[in-house]
Image: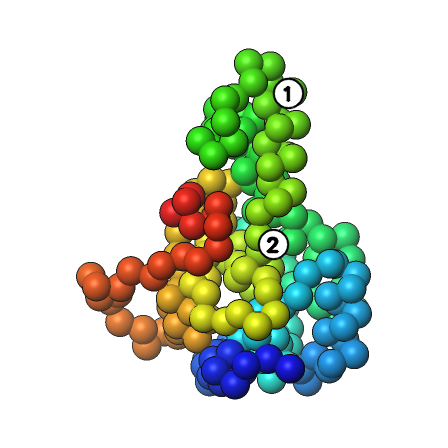
């Protein structure tokens, strides 16, 4: 059972999405479905993310021309496991791509091996220990972790990481609400997930 604050935050995010009218919402994921997903993919949803998906499951619509992601909402119910796995792997694979092709190296990993293959192997070993990020929508992510909530939503594109919302409800407002105003200068979400927060 998640925290009340996390559950309230997730429910508020779900209401905000429903109010936009942009997406069809199927009945939310059940406890049995959460158990299967978390077992199959080896992570636990944060409390707010879980409550969001329990309130209603967003359904993908046919993509518009030029849209990068044909199925931006992870298809947790009955979707293609390979597609969901690719979305889950996206953050780590993006960092590895930057290591391989852009010379990126995280200082916490120690000295970069001169050999490219050795550098990639070392980066892969280190990345196996970073917190799991769970897709919310396209390349927007929340950290995994039962008992946690209120994390900023991160937009992940290789090592280009930015905050897209101070929490899940704010993210839904920023991404989907046409009535959103200009972002205030004081808006400065603090990422919480080790390693990933250092890429901001």
In the image, residue 103 above or below residue 76: above
Residue 46 visible in rendering: yes
Quarter location, residue 52 = bottom right
Q: Nearer the viewer, residue 195 or 86?
A: 195
Left or right: residue 152 versus residue 50 is left
Q: Are marks 2 and 1 in contact (CB under 8 Å)?
A: no
Query: Could you tell me which quadrant the N terminus lies in?
Result: bottom right
**Residue at image point 62% right, 45% down:** 129
Label 2 vs label 1: CA separation? 23 Å
Helix, strand or loop status at disc 1: helix
**Residue at image point 59% right, 65% down:** 145
**What residue is pinned by disc 2?**
132
Q: Nearer the viewer, residue 177 or 105?
A: 105
Q: How many marks?
A: 2
Residue found farthest to the top: 114
**Residue at image point 61% right, 75% down:** 50
* Residue 142 x, y percent position in the rendering: 53, 62
* Residue 195 x, y percent position in the rendering: 48, 45
**What residue is pinned by disc 1?**
118
Q: Nearer the viewer, residue 86 or 72?
A: 86
């Amino acid at each position: 059972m998640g925290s009340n604050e996390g559950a309230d935050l997730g429910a508020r995010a779900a209401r905000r999405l429903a109010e936009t009218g942009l997406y069809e919402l199927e009945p939310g994921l059940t406890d049995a479905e959460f158990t299967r997903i978390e077992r199959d993919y080896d992570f636990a949803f944060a409390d707010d993310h879980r409550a969001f998906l329990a309130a209603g499951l967003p359904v993908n619509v046919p993509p518009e021309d030029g849209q990068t992601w044909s199925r931006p909402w992870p298809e947790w119910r009955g979707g293609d496991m390979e597609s969901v796995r690719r979305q889950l792997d996206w953050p780590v694979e993006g960092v590895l791509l930057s290591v391989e092709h852009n010379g990126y190296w995280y200082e916490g990993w120690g000295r970069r091996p001169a050999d490219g293959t050795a550098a990639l192997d070392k980066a892969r070993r280190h990345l196996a220990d970073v917190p799991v990020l769970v897709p919310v929508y396209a390349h927007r992510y929340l950290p995994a972790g039962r008992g946690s909530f209120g994390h900023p939503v991160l937009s992940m594109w290789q090592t280009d990481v930015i905050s897209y919302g101070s929490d899940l409800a704010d993210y839904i407002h920023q991404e989907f609400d046409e009535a959103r105003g200009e972002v205030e200068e004081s808006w400065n979400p603090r990422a919480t997930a080790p390693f990933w927060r250092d890429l901001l």
